[in-house]
């Protein structure tokens, strides 16, 4: 391969999750020369009012996901599952392992293991299994022809849960934050590619809150670590997964911890 850049792959449940939860971190990594990739488990086939068919909204949201990815030079793939039917099983793990072996990331970011919606939590489990399996030579995806196993297990991170809470309404605290203050305008543009979701929330809630809520969350996280806007992350540190702080080292000048201290 001629592309020697470090590679980050964000694997989320639905189109727009990657951009909303870690769009600023992705923009920072791109600015540092990393090659980005985004996978969504579904094409977002339930993300619309009744006026559209599943096929119509899937097509629209797939196109929006491609446009958002293109705007930052990211590779994009959809794992082909359906909304509300994302479950960790052999088939979903095989699909994600094949995509991991195709993109060959150094760092993977997925949903928090505890989140507001089961699609997100199941995606987190699928990715945890797939990251481990991607480097296991005897694990076969049954894809023809299969991509080669990756040489080493990628470093795994979890984004914040939506609104920073688990399904019981308990706060989940990040291990560290990325200061995205000067990426915020670009993050708004990136998230704005998902125009159908903005319209859906506007129809549903009667107010145009798609971008404003995302901005409020970034301000709240920023407030916890002493900057204007931030995103929160945790690193998976279980046995068998790399513990090196690859993302923290790559974005060292922008890493913050709670209370505003700098990372060292
Ligand atoms: Zn989602």
Image (cartoon, rainbow, N blue to C red):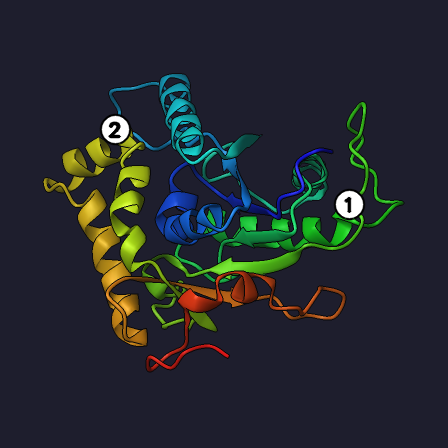
- Residue displayed at 83% across by 38% down: 140
Residue 174 as seen in the image, left or right of residue 192:
right
In the depicted structure, whether residue 163 falls above or below residue 85: below
x, y percent for residue 141: 78, 35
Comparing 132 with 125, the one in front is 132
Is label 1 or label 2 in front?
1
Comparing 152 with 27, the one in front is 27
Residue hosting label 2: 49
In the depicted structure, whether residue 95 falls above or below residue 19: above
Q: Earlier in the sequence, mark 1 or mark 2?
A: 2
x, y percent for residue 42: 49, 33
Neighbour tally class for label 1: few under 14, some 14-19, many 20 plus, Cα within 10 Å: many
| Numbered circle sitting on residue 150 | 1
Comparing 110 with 2, the one in front is 2
Neighbour tally class for label 2: few under 14, some 14-19, many 20 plus, Cα within 10 Å: few
Comparing 107 with 78, the one in front is 107
- Residue displayed at 21% across by 39% down: 201
**SS for tag 1?**
loop
x, y percent for residue 116: 39, 57
In the depicted structure, whether residue 169 falls above or below residue 87: below
From this viewpoint, which residue is outermost toward the right? 138
């Amino acid at each position: 391969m001629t592309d020697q850049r470090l590679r980050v792959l964000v694997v989320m449940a639905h189109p727009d999750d990657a951009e909303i939860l870690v769009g600023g971190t992705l923009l920072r990594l791109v600015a540092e020369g990393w090659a980005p990739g985004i996978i969504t488990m579904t094409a977002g086939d339930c993300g619309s009012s009744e006026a559209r068919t599943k096929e119509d909204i899937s097509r629209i949201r797939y196109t929006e996901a491609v446009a958002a990815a293109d705007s930052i030079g990211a590779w994009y793939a959809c794992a082909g599952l359906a909304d509300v039917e994302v479950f960790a099983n052999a088939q979903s793990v095989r699909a994600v392992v094949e995509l991991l072996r195709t993109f060959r990331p150094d760092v993977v970011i997925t949903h928090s293991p505890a989140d507001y919606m089961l699609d997100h939590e199941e995606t987190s489990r699928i990715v945890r299994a797939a990251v481990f399996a991607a480097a296991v030579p005897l694990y076969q995806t049954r894809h023809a022809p299969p991509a080669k196993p990756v040489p080493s297990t990628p470093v795994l991170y979890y984004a914040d849960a939506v609104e920073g809470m688990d399904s019981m309404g308990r706060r989940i605290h990040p291990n560290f934050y990325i200061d995205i203050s000067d990426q915020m305008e670009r993050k708004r543009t990136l998230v704005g590619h998902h125009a159908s979701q903005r319209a859906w929330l506007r129809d549903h809630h009667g107010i145009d809150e798609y971008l404003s809520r995302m901005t409020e969350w970034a301000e709240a996280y920023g407030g916890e670590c002493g900057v204007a806007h931030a995103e929160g992350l945790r690193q998976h540190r279980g046995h068998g997964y790399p513990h090196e702080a690859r993302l923290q080292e790559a974005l060292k000048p922008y890493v913050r911890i709670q209370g505003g201290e700098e990372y060292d």
